[in-house]
Amino acid sequence: MTDTHAALPSLADRARHVDVDGTVVGVHFFGRTPVFVLGEEALLFAPEDGARRVAIHAGGILASVADGSRIVTGGDDGKLIATDADGAHQVIAADDKKRWIDQIALGPDSAVAWSTGKTAHVRAKKSEPRSFEAPSTVAGLAFAPKGFRLAIAHYNGATLWFPNVADAVPHKLEWKGSHLGVTFSPDGRFLVTTMQEQALHGWRLSDSQHMRMTGYSARVRSLGWTVGGAFLATSGSEQLILWPFDGKDGPMRRQPKMLAPSEARVTVVACHPRQPVVATGYADGAVLLVRIDDGALIKARQADSQPISALGWDASAQVLAFGTEAGSAGVLTL
Amino acid sequence: MTTQTAPEKIPVTVLTGYLGAGKTTLLNRILSEPHGRKFAVIVNEFGEIGIDNELVVNADEEVFEMNNGCICCTVRGDLVRIIDGLMRRKGKFDAIIVETTGLADPAPVAQTFFMDEAVGAKTKLDAVVTVADAKWLKDRLKDAPEAKNQIAFADVILINKTDLVEPGDLSELEARIRGLNPYARLHRTERAQIALNEVLGRNAFDLDRILDIEPQFLEADEHDHDHHHHDHDHHGHDHHRHGNGLKHYHDEDMQSVSLKTDKPLNPDKFFPWVQDLVATEGKDILRCKGILSFKDDPERFVFQGVHMILDGDHQRPWGPNEKRESRIIFIGRKLPKEKIREGFENCVA
């Protein structure tokens, strides 16, 4: 294998290795402590003074989200579980038929949304639990940045649902095909879905104007908004793809910025919470820090042919954590 | 730096069969035998499986069209999600079995493994196994297009419940099945009793191990008359074989076209022709397979396809004493036989 990034400045040697047994599927933080989500059963808390495994699910972990005070996971045991910084965990919901819980979103008022099959559920502190029947299996959930509104991705489009407004008619956004993931732009003006096809689809919510974002070499499985919502950073190509969302038309009739080209495909992206920088993980195991303004690159993990499967920053952007499909993990303190 | 070898892909067996044919019986048999293998099972109804298996997943059979409505690009969206989820637990199972409903079309299941890059990178389709009810299949072939599809699409067919019919009826049923699908492996079973290696690990979609595509009914003919060799000239032997052992049936709308030639083919003619053929007729072509001898090419070229999806590669050098012969077969509905035959013959170098 040739290392296309051999000459780059590197911080890779400064990373702390974490022993993980099993595929890493996500990483979240409590303060500066990284917590790796494993493909099966457990979370791995990885503070500097020793890792600790906390078993929470009886089976595979299919989805995880976090808000700094809790990590909420869904499993193939049909359970939705919240875990706090001490590792204490409680079951928020359990499906009586043990259907998979593979979509979760966290919202305002400690709200949590999840799905089982075609049903999207929402539970918030101050309101009754509610549910919504989508026309087909729910494949993505996202809360709007303002208000109490949930976007639900499914076949042939997405639905915007106001869980607390009893008689509100859900707003349907239609586009033929299978929509697998969904995200609101941080300013709430755009909704973007990832599709089964190698493309993203977007709507400007003010007028439901369509946006098609194509040209990928694979299905887009990871995306995130750069600081201030200026760009939507995505995986799915042999370079970091950044769609501009700064103007009133977003990416309509504009080309994306394409940075950090490689022979390997980008598998995961994690946007720096404070700077226009994107941590970019590749299928060959490399992790690069990519500065958007000038495309400058710093290596954070050496390529070793283990696809990167998880990548995340702590809220202060001092710590970057990464994990691989093959089950290795590292923590880089900047 | 060391290069790691690509991890083994998990084989996926698709179990089809019309309502009541015995799919679940076969599934329970596979799961309960002491084979030491671990299966993840994707079913359409919970509760029918009598075996305790933590890796049983309920599927919704959600079929959708990719690429804005091309019906040959239909895939099973639920399978994409389920396989994504299952692969988080790799190491916990050696193979995946997908049980479809009795009314399901196997094509979208098969196409999922070719159309979704992430699924195709981690798993591979092993075979489509169809369970048929010996007593009722004949009727279903008349009134249920789904049943006909499942037979035509199959790599392995179990004619189940043979204890409920007379031997003569069974031979006739086999001939009818052969009329729809000449290359599937046929097995007669009672209560779905069969050796597992006859249904699992078949590599039916694997180009490297493409099974001999000589239609199986010829084999059966040869067992009946051992003096009867098939090297005399016949274009499209699907017509001419009315052996004593097997009567040959022509189904009105589902047939196979099999062709061969010992003249080397011109790849610059063959590829445009076959690509155009599946582009125009792909909706009606359920399966195709071929072993090809190209002019001045020392290697066998093999291909197989499902509707409009074609997959092909060089396989291995022709042996020194091997007869260099090109053979192709198409199974489908209302196939334009003469057009296909002419097109194929025009590919001769």
Image: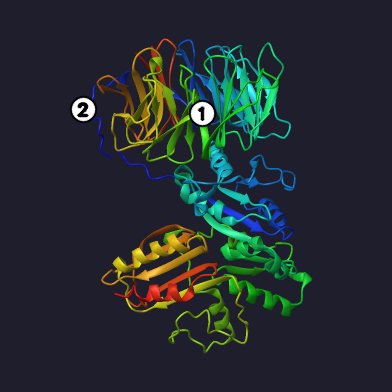
x, y (%) of residue A109?
A: 61, 11
Along the viewing direction, whichever of B148 and A313 lies nearer the viewer: B148
> Looking at the image, which residue is at 71% across and 71% down?
B138
Q: Which residue is mark 1?
A: A182
Display coloring: rainbow
Q: Quadrant of residue A14?
A: top left
Instruction: Output the chain of dot 1.
Output: A
Same-subunit check for callouts 2 and 1: yes
> Looking at the image, which residue is at 78% across and 70% down?
B164
> In the figure, A165 relative to A115: above or below?
above
10 Å crowding of disc 2: few (<14), some (14-19), many (20+): few
10 Å crowding of disc 1: few (<14), some (14-19), many (20+): many
Residue B341 lies left or right of residue B268; in this view the side is right
In the image as oriented, which residue stretches furthest toward the front? A207
Residue A170 lies left or right of residue B236; in this view the side is right
Q: Quadrant of residue B139?
A: bottom right
x, y (%) of residue B10?
A: 51, 48
Can residue A319 be seen here? yes
> Looking at the image, which residue is at 72% across and 80% down?
B168
Query: Mark 2 or mark 1: which is in front?
Result: 1
Query: Quadrant where the C terminus of chain B lies?
Result: bottom left
